[in-house]
Structure formats: structure tokens, C-alpha cells
Amino acid sequence: MSKYDVAVIGSGPGGYVAAIRCAQLGMKTAIIEKYNTLGGTCLNVGCIPSKALLDSSHHYEDAIKHFEDHGIEIPGEVKINFKKMIERKGAVVEQTTKGIEFLMNKNKIDVFTGVGAFKDATHIEITGDKNETIEAANTIIATGSKPATLPFIKIDKERIITSTEALSLKEIPKHMIVIGGGVIGLELGQVYRRLGAEVSVIEYMDRIIPTMDSAQSKELTKVMKKQGVKFYLSHKVSAVSKKKNEITVTATDKKDKEVTFTGDYCLVSVGRRAFTEGLKPENAGVKITERGLVETNEHLQTNVKNIYAIGDVVKGAMLAHKASEEGTLVAEILAGQKPHIDYNLIPGVVYTWPEVASVGKTEEQLKEAKVSYNSGQFPMRALGRSRASGDTDGFVKILSDKETDEVLGVHMVGARVADLIAEAVVAMEFRASAEDIARMSHAHPTYAEAVKEAALAATGDRALHV
Ligand code: FAD
Ligand code: NAD
């Protein structure tokens, strides 16, 4: 029987990063993945394919709507080859997952293909092409998550679908009804809207992306409405049915009036749930919470001392970079180090266009915690760079402590803010004040100038270009 210092179950951005870091630190490492490709949800049916389709559909939208503004004329009709778009997405995924295989080889990590199940706290049975059992002194559970649904919805994977199927459709929907105005609903809703589908988003709360700052919800709603997406907020879905190719979704609005929607596809994007099926955690005595998460302490250790858990299968934001940080943290703990993650500084991004990005506390959270703060906001439309590219929607908002001026939260909507948020993370990691950011030189002309301007605004109405 093969023996390892560490076995990692699941090869998503949590698991594969944990495995690499364990190997870097000199541990004999195995990774177990039930699918034939590595990379988990993120690389196969999540972050990467969704961004590939967002990019392709963005190019199309630019070609049909914006090229003309730049004096670029396309003789004849611009056409979508949807099959090719999906194939390109597949190629991007393949290249990326192959990259993980390369990294596993490079770091001398043994890859096992099959479902990993605990036999006991130090033995894992792998059921796949060949069945075998390995011994591991320590195990990291990184089994991720799966799409959640509502109790009365039957996902048929053809017309009533989750993000997984929405990334590999064979045709562009005529009318896609999206249940849930969170990250997936908006990113994939925008893809299909750009490609010509009618898109109706039904959201239970009174705003989309309800966990982000409400100014971001408002701005994104405004822009996506201009793009033609229809929003039905404060609507509670009560039934979804299918007759041949027609889907009917029934919901009640906030006045308790019943509303029905008919379309040819229904995307269910109401969140994701932790996944531990087939893992048999009970054989090792690992506790699972009522919500199905693997229970861990602040060191991501389960109640069984040599078993840890990371990523979507434990509490916290279901984000790839959060999973990866946790993978690194556990590897370093196993090596005797004392790493730390500041969960307040894990940024959140929605890759619509304009993009939406946040770090730290929202205005709603500061109000609830009764923290006195200054707020400085700067509109993208006031930037030379935004006018040059034509991306004038959005803003940067900086919230800073009223007494100390420490930056407490940064919230952005606009072109490339997914990349821009890194500046805010660095600033907050070093506990910068708004004044610190305001005094730093930002290259001109860049979108980043909006960060400096918002910091100037937060330190007392000092923005220069409004
Ligand atoms: P996962 O990536 O889910 O990986 C878990 C792996 O474990 C899977 O490969 C699974 O097959 C395997 N596994 C499970 N059980 C077993 C077992 N018993 N034996 C062997 N293998 C097993 N996050 C971002 O930060 N940015 C984004 O842009 C983004 N976009 C997304 C878009 C979509 C459409 C979706 C669905 C998600 C997106 N996410 C994004 C979320 C991100 O994908 C997850 O947060 C991330 O993948 C979690 O990583 P993980 O390693 O915890 O689990
Ligand atoms: P989400 O939690 O982002 O959004 C779900 C939305 O559905 C919420 O707005 C919620 O209020 C709404 N909802 C819940 N029940 C409803 C009901 N009965 N009727 C109508 N609306 C309802 O979840 P998601 O969009 O499914 O994404 C799942 C996870 O994947 C998220 O945790 C997210 O972090 C991750 N993800 C991240 C990215 C990214 O980082 N860019 C992209 C995609 C997915």
C-alpha cells in the first residue's frame, strides 16, 4: 500500500494548490480526483469557461454595437458561430486543466483518478479505473460544491439547467429565465443577452448581488437594464414546469400577485451547496454540519486532528482564490508554520461588463456595526481613460474610518475593476488610510485614477476632476 504524508481529496483550486504547497514544503503528496480532468469546478465548469464565454460574447457585442462609434465599419452582417464559441471555450478549459497535470508532474505529486472515500482516519479507498487504498498521515478534504436548487424544481439538464449546462448549450436560447440575480445569474445572463436572447432575471431579494454594496447593485441594475436584461426583484419563485420545449416559471411579487414567465430555457442559479457525497466522512468520524459543510476550527482542522478541510466544502465565500489561500494555509500548518488568512480582505468580483469588485466592509455592514465612516465616490465617466475607451459606466467608492481615516471598504463598478481591486487589497493589507492612497501617484490616463480620486473624495471633498 502506498503511504503519503498528505492526501488531498479533490483537485479544484483549493485541492491542487494545497497539493503543490505541500510538495514544495517537502511532503510526499497524493491528490485524488473523481473526474478525468483536474482543476475542479473552477477550471472545468466554473471560473474559466464562464470567463471564456464572457470574453467571446463581449467581442461580439463590441462588433455589433460599439465598433461603429470607433469608425470601424464591417461590410455585411456580423454572425455568431455559437458552436465555435463553445468549442473555443472547451479548448481554453482543456489547456488550463492540462496545465494542472503539468504542475502535478513537476511537483512530483501522485495523481489518483477515482472517488476517494475514507476507510478510517488514515486510509482512503479510491474507486475508479483501478481500485486501491492509500495510507495518509494527514488528509485535506477539498471536495468543493455543486449547484443548489429549490425543492420544487427538477433540473432536467436540458431546458431547466444549472451553470454547468449553460456553459455548453447547443443553441442560443430565445428567452432564458434566470432564477437568482447573484453572480452566476448575472454573468451567464449577460452572455446570452449579448448573443441575442431575451433574459429575465427573477430575484427573491429587493436587489441583485444582494451581498455586495447596494450602490453596486443599483449601478449594475441600471447598466444591465440598458443592455436589455429584465429584472423582477422581490419575486418569490413557487413553481417551474416544462411542456415540450416550453418552460413556465411561476412567482409571486411583493404584493403577493402571481406572475408567470414562459421561456425556452430556465437557468437555476440560487447558490451552491457543499459536496461530500461518496466521501464517507463518517468512517473517519469527521463532523458535517446541518448545512452539509465539513466542520472546521480556525485552522481549518476538522474534529479529527489529522484531517483538514478547505474551499467550498467549508464555511465562507465560495470563491476560487479563497479556496487556494486555504489550501496554502493548511499546507503551511502541516509544515509547522503559523500562516494566517484575513477573510475580510478576500475580494469579490462579478465579471459582467462593467465589472463589479469589492473588498472589506460594505456601507450597509458599517451602518449595522455602527461604525462612523467617510465615503468618497468618483464616477468613471469623469476619467479621460474611460472616455477614450467608451467605458463610462460605474464608479469607485472608498469607505474610511471617520476618526482614523483607515480604509474599511472599497467598492467598484467599471471597466477592468476586477484587476483594479488588487490595489485596494494591498492598501488594506497594509492598513492604509484614504489619505495614503490619495497621495500616491497613479499613472495617467488609467482607470486606476478613479481610486486616487475616490480616496481624495473620502478625505474631504478633494476630488480633482469632478
Ligand atoms: P471545486 O473546484 O468544486 O473542486 C472540488 C473537486 O473535488 C471536484 O473536481 C470534484 O470532482 C472533486 N471531488 C469531490 N468529491 C470527491 C471525492 N470523494 N473523490 C475525489 N474527488 C472528489 N470563483 C471565483 O473566485 N471566480 C470566478 O470567476 C468564479 N466563477 C465561477 C463560475 C461558475 C459558473 C461557477 C459554478 C463557480 C465559479 N466560481 C468562481 C466559484 C469557484 O469555482 C469555486 O469557489 C471553486 O471551484 C472552489 O474550489 P474547491 O477546490 O473548493 O472545489
Ligand atoms: P449567489 O449566492 O451569488 O446568488 C444566488 C442568488 O439567488 C441570490 O441573489 C439569492 O438572493 C437568489 N435566490 C435564492 N433563492 C431564490 C429564490 N427562491 N428565488 C429567487 N432568487 C433566489 O449564487 P450563484 O450565483 O448561484 O453562485 C454560486 C456561488 O458560486 C457563489 O457563492 C459565488 O461566490 C460563486 N461564483 C463566483 C463567481 C465569481 O467570483 N465571479 C462567479 C460565479 C459563481
Image (tube, helix red, strand yellow):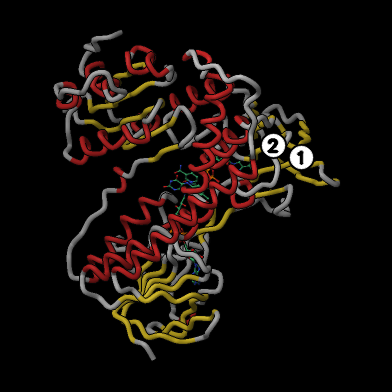
Q: Is mark 1 within 8 Å of ligand 2?
A: no
Where residue 217 is drawn, which disc sits there? Answer: none
Q: Position of residue 392 (x, y in %)?
A: 42, 17
Reply above or below: 462 against 335.
Answer: above
Callout 2 amino acid: Met
Q: Position of residue 446 (x, y in %)?
A: 28, 22
Q: Is residue 92 left or right of residue 238?
A: left
Label 2 secondary element: strand
User: Is there CB contact under 8 Å for labels 2 and 1?
Assistant: yes
Q: Which residue is mark 2?
A: 176
Q: Which residue is mark 1?
A: 264
**Residue displayed at 73% across by 34% down:** 174
Callout 1 amino acid: Asp
Image quadrant containing the C terminus: top left
Which residue extends farthest top?
466
Q: Is residue 364 left or right of residue 434?
A: right
Q: CA distance from mark 2 to mark 1?
A: 6 Å
Which residue extends farthest right?
243
Q: Position of residue 314 (x, y in %)?
A: 42, 60
Label 1 secondary element: loop
Q: Earlier in the sequence, mark 2 or mark 1?
A: 2
